[in-house]
């Protein structure tokens, strides 16, 4: 048997750039072009989630039209 059963497991990866809290009424009034200010700076690391659980930290990398994340630290589970 070639490969592992792990080869078929899919994991949903998300990257958290920052967070914001605002009243629902304000959110409902927002339209196209609205700006939501986040609690992070451009130099802050992002949090990488696997199935909504934090697994790593990383840095945003922009190469041409693509946005990527370089993992800088694995988090302990």
Image (cartoon, rainbow, N blue to C red):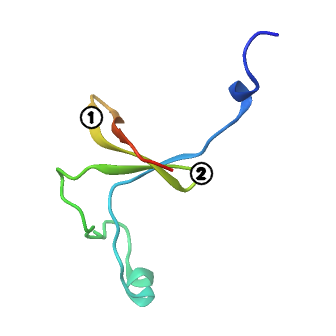
- Residue for badge 1: 62
Residue 11 against residue 34 in the figure, above or below:
above
Of helix, strand and loop, which one carries label 1?
A: strand
- Whichever of labels 2 and 1 marks the residue nearer the N terminus, that label is 2
Residue, x 27% and y 28% (percent of image)?
64
Residue, x 27% and y 67% (percent of image)?
38
Residue 35 in picture, x, y percent from top left: 28, 68
Could you say which disc has been placed on residue 51 in the image?
Answer: 2
Residue, x 55% and y 56% (percent of image)?
52
Of helix, strand and loop, which one carries label 2?
A: loop
Give the crowd class for mark 1: few <14, some 14-19, many >=20 residues within 10 Å: few
Q: Residue furthest front?
A: 76
Q: Is residue 28 left or right of residue 35?
A: right
Q: Nearer the viewer, residue 39 or 3?
A: 3
Residue 35 against residue 28 in the figure, above or below:
above
Residue 6 in picture, x, y percent from top left: 70, 28
Q: Is residue 35 left or right of residue 6?
A: left
């Amino acid at each position: 048997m070639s490969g592992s059963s792990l080869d078929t497991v899919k994991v949903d990866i998300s990257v958290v750039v920052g967070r914001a809290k605002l009243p629902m009424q304000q959110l409902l009034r927002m339209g196209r072009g609205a700006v939501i200010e986040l609690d992070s700076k451009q130099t802050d690391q992002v949090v990488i989630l696997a199935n909504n659980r934090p697994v790593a930290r990383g840095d945003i990398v922009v190469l041409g039209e693509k946005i990527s994340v370089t993992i800088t630290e694995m988090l302990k589970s």
